[in-house]
Image: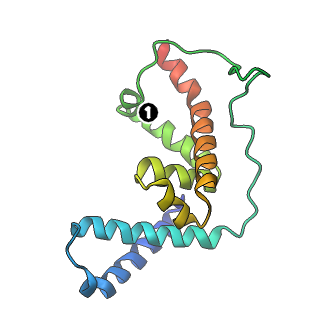
Amino acid sequence: MLRDEEDARDCVQEALLSAHRALGDFEGRARLGTWLHRIATNAALMRLRKRRTQQEEPFEEGLPSFDRFGNRLGPERSNALSPEELLQRADARKRVWEALDALPESYRTVLLLRDIEGFSTRETAEWLETTEGGVRVRLHRARSALKERLRPLFAEEDD
């Protein structure tokens, strides 16, 4: 989520300290691992909020192109492997993470929270201090850009 090993280590340390401080408040309604995971996610999101002061770069080059009628431009693929089959391959997994890593932070964060962590649109909007509409737009753009970045991988698998 943070794209930086040192930041991730710092967040883990902060999360463990927070968990230690709040252990008396743990009610046991969830598994301990789930509770700790949420604390670690919160620590990472807080760090991302601190970074948000940086100017975000324009993000249009990674999106798919459409004609004036709304038809997608570019090569079509057929008989492609499913995303699950692609992720089973180590090289494909590496490329997916590299493509995710190449997304601008705000898009990558939304994609990770919604599609990887499983947070709802409302929860994601609250965490990122934005609107649900903003989350949906970023998520759509992030998914589209990720699909475009991974298009060569799908084409290779078709060969």
| Residue 36 in picture, x, y percent from top left | 31, 70
| Circle 1: element type | helix
- Residue furthest out toward the right: 68
Which quadrant holds residue 15?
A: bottom left
| Residue 26 in picture, x, y percent from top left | 25, 80
Is 3 in front, or is 38?
38
Q: Tell me the kind of residue under disc 1.
A: Asp
Which class describes the residues within 10 Å of circle 1: few (<14), some (14-19), or many (20+)? few
In this picture, residue 148 sits left or right of residue 26: right
Q: Is residue 61 above or below residue 30?
A: above
Q: Is residue 86 above or below residue 135?
A: above
For the point 47% across and 66% down, which residue is it?
Answer: 8
| Residue 100 in picture, x, y percent from top left | 55, 45
For the point 41% across and 54% down, which residue is it?
Answer: 117
| Residue 114 in picture, x, y percent from top left | 47, 51
Q: Please count the marks in the image.
A: 1
Which quadrant holds residue 66?
A: top right
Is 72 in front, or is 53?
72
Q: Is residue 65 above or below residue 60?
A: above
For the point 40% across and 52% down, which residue is it?
Answer: 118
Q: Which residue is mark 1?
A: 91
In this picture, residue 10 sits left or right of residue 131: left
For the point 62% across and 73% down, which residue is it?
Answer: 50
